[in-house]
């Protein structure tokens, strides 16, 4: 997982020839299916220089019941959001999303779509990295995520 995070940070650091990235903090809540249903709570950092290519990195926790026992599992992820319609902010409602996520039990590349970078629907295939699994259940195969990303600025304004 450390190698994946280092790779994401390396790409972010050297992908911008000139200029600064703007960073936005977000709280995330969602649902993940990985041979089992999990709820997800965490945070993400969104980096953008232009509005057509956006980078996100995040960390969260997955919570659920596996073989009648409550479990919590850490997750890190990195995404690239792409929309090549430049300088048309009003029509930037959807982005193509490509990324990867990793836990201490599996690694999963994923693709999907996101609306305004706030509501994500992604799917992929997970590869198990732990032969024991989680409470005896191996976590590999189809991976589906539905996530709501709430910018902290929006929360701050709402709670005023």
Image (spheres, rainbow, N blue to C red):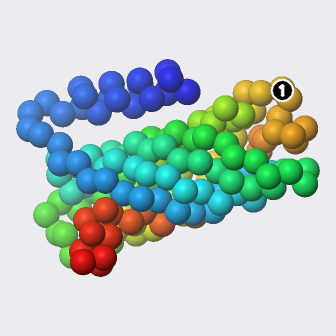
Q: Residue 57 in the image: x percent, y percent?
A: 40, 42
Taking the spot 29% from the left edge, 78% from the top edge, the residue there is 158
Q: Is residue 28 above or below residue 119?
A: above
**The C terminus: image quadrant:** bottom left
Q: Residue 98 in the image: x percent, y percent?
A: 47, 47
Question: Which residue reaches farthest front?
Answer: 160
Q: Residue 113 in the image: x percent, y percent?
A: 47, 61
In the displayed structure, does residue 65 sit left or right of residue 9? right
In the displayed structure, does residue 159 sit left or right of residue 6? left
Count of numbered marks: 1
Q: Is residue 86 above or below residue 55?
A: below
Taking the spot 63% from the left edge, 36% from the top edge, the residue there is 103
* Residue where numbered disc 1 is placed: 131
Identify which residue, 84 or 94, lies in the foreground.
Answer: 94
Q: Is residue 75 visible?
A: yes
Q: Secondary structure at mark 1?
A: loop
Q: Is residue 53 visible?
A: no
Q: Residue 11 in the image: x percent, y percent?
A: 32, 29
Taking the spot 41% from the left edge, 24% from the top edge, the residue there is 6
Taking the spot 57% from the left edge, 63% from the top edge, the residue there is 30
Q: Quadrant of residue 13?
A: top left
Question: Which residue reaches farthest left?
Answer: 19
Q: Is residue 94 above or below residue 96?
A: below
Identify which residue, 107 or 75, lies in the foreground.
Answer: 75
In the displayed structure, does residue 37 sit left or right of residue 90? right
**The N terminus: image quadrant:** top right
Q: Residues within 10 Å of mark 1 (few under 14, many from 20)?
A: few
Identify which residue, 50 or 137, lies in the foreground.
Answer: 137
């Amino acid at each position: 997982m450390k190698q994946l995070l280092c790779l994401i940070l390396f790409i972010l650091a050297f992908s911008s020839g000139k200029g600064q990235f703007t960073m936005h903090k977000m709280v995330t809540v969602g649902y993940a299916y990985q041979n089992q249903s999990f709820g997800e709570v965490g945070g993400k950092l969104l980096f953008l220089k232009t509005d057509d290519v956006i980078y996100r990195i995040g960390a969260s926790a997955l919570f659920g019941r596996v073989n009648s026992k409550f479990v919590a599992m850490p997750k890190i992820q990195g995404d690239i959001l792409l929309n090549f319609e430049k300088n048309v902010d009003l029509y930037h409602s959807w982005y193509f999303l490509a990324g990867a996520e990793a836990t201490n039990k599996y690694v999963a590349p994923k693709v999907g779509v996101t609306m305004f970078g706030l509501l994500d629907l992604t799917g992929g295939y997970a590869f198990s990295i732990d032969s024991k699994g989680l409470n005896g259940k191996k976590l590999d195969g189809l991976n589906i995520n539905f996530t709501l990303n709430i910018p902290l600025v929006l929360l701050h304004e709402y709670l005023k």
